[in-house]
Image (tube, rainbow, N blue to C red):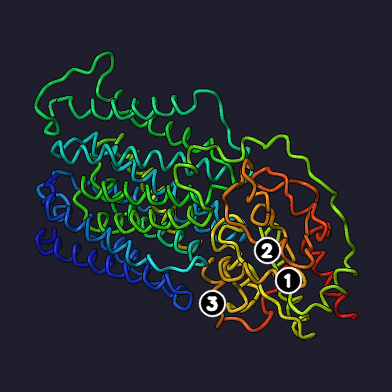
Amino acid sequence: MLDPTYSGYVKDGVYILATILFIYALHEMSNPATARKGVLWAGAGMFLAVLVTAIFSGASPDAFVPGINISQGQLEENLGLMAIAIAIGGGLAYLWAIRVKMTDMPQMVAIYNGMGGGAAAGIAALALIARTDTVGYLGLAVVGGLIGSVSFAGSLIAFLKLQGWMRQKPITFPGQQAINIIVLLAAIVFGAVTLLNDSGHVGAIGTSVAIPFVGINTALLLFFVLGLGYGFMMAIPIGGADMPVVISLFNAFTGMAVALDGFATSNYAMIVAGMLVGSAGSLLTLLMAKAMNRSISNVLFSAFGATEETGVEMKGSMKPIEAADVAALLAYAGKVIIAPGYGMAVAQAQHKVKEMMDVLEKKDVVVKFAIHPVAGRMPGHMNVLLAEAGVPYDHLYDRDEINQEFASADVAMVIGANDVVNPAARRQGSPLFGMPILDVDAAKNVIVLKRGQGKGFAGVENDLFYKDNTRMLYGDAQETVAKLVQELKKL
Amino acid sequence: MTAIDPISAGFIAVLAAFTGYEVIARVPSLLHTPLMSGSNFIHGVVLVGAMVALAFATNPAEQVLGFVAVVLGAANVTGGYAVTDRILEMFDRSKKGPGAKKED
């Protein structure tokens, strides 16, 4: 056995180093030029923290829990289990993550975030079962356990919805808000009750409040079941389009839960990393909601997309156009602005779009990309895909930068975007009302590449498609753009 | 378990929260997704807590709970890393020539 004081210093020293690396990594990740290296730094920090924990929990348990009483046999058995658990969880998650399609990345963030939340809930549960802490710390474990469970169940629903294994549309029923609040309150009550009960352990106020009807273990179980239930109930009324914001919120939740567990288990690395993610994640959530001109409470409680606007007659009709005609229009345009959306991501059309950009630029056509902050399924989704295809950053413009330019564009080309270009957002009474959109309808000609005649994520009819200057080019975005490139090369 | 000093831990938590806020405050929107994924990876440090909890489990119930927590925490770490790396790979322009990526 190593000297616990000495190994405690080594362990905490490594934790401090890991913390520095995490902060530096976040800093690097907030700049496009250094972002890639950022995750390497974070990875290095994580590796060190895990390694030192694995070594010292076996070699010097006192460094973690002074005066701990555990037999060598039990410890060795636990360490064996630990190795197996890391191999299973880590191995499967890694293999899955490197195999999924890029378009599925948003739900992968959701599922792995949920797992972190689940782990945090598990740690809280263990602290509450062992009850070796004082009541204050157990109280923090209760809060951490609740937030972790909510994040776990909620993220799971977000994953299922985005993966298409569950209906994307909001699931609502009468009295939903009231039931949700009751579930949450019940969870809090059972959490509090477990704290008040003194079942012969240190961790209680000292009063011996008997738990009516159920014992302490049942109360704990009910607490976690209700916590999971609340996470589930909280996520089902949220539509697929709002999920990125919600995933970000659950990400912040998990961070908070980890920090609270850090207090309860005397782990500074968890406190600092958890708070970092808790605050950065909260800010990120606010930024994302702001990009959609919505408040967090509106995202969470309005069941956006569940209701449809009634009594609005669409004037005119959708007018189809052939690829050859579009190619001619593009080739003789002075300026073309492309507004991509989720349809481009699904069709993996970004490489063809880049090719089209190259051909057009050779013909002295100015090509710009208008990126709506929430185009696709996550903020930045389009930037990532276009960057992958090799479109230079300086061709990508934010909504605010480019919106006034549509009026001077000869062609605005919408590739698989819908709600973010829907002028209905300017009309009071539309479910989209108030959302900032790309003003593509201001361009001389609008070409919409679209798979079929369906509605967007929000389930709202798109006024744009019925405008006089709009033409619809139907088909899979990748095939259609490939056709356009061929036609352009002929000209 | 000997608890840490709640006051100094509280100060540390507050400072960490402000650090997280400041580091992210001026991030361009194109990095929102990678940052969300990256911070998702960082809270994977929950694995460390799960490992400690499992290491000192004293009965089968605690072992099962600890085991599940470690499995979930490890998945958060490796999955979170792989997803973040794959998203950020697309920002790395130095690695590929023009049109090099054409697997589809």
Tell me the CA gap for discs 3 and 2. Answer: 21 Å
- Quick check: can you spot residue A165? no
Residue highlighted by disc 1 = A353
Residue highlighted by disc 3 = B92
Residue A304 in percent (x, y) is at: 57, 40
**Residue reaching furthest top?**
A213
- The label nearer to you, 1 versus 2, is 2
Image quadrant where residue A48 sits = bottom left
What's the residue type where badge 2 is placed? Pro
Q: Which chain carries label 3?
A: B
Residue A450 in percent (x, y) is at: 78, 56
In the rendered structure, the answer to whether residue B103 lies left or right of residue B43 reads right
Tell me the CA gap for discs 1 and 3. Answer: 19 Å
Same chain under badges 1 and 3? The reply is no
Q: Do the residues labelled 3 and 2 touch (CB within 8 Å)?
A: no
Which of pointers 1 and 2 lies earlier in the amino acid sequence?
2
Tell me the quadrant of the picture where the C terminus of chain A can be found.
bottom right
Q: Are marks 1 and 2 in contact (CB under 8 Å)?
A: yes
Residue A142 in percent (x, y) is at: 26, 36
The kind of secondary structure element at disc 1 is helix
Residue highlighted by disc 2 = A340
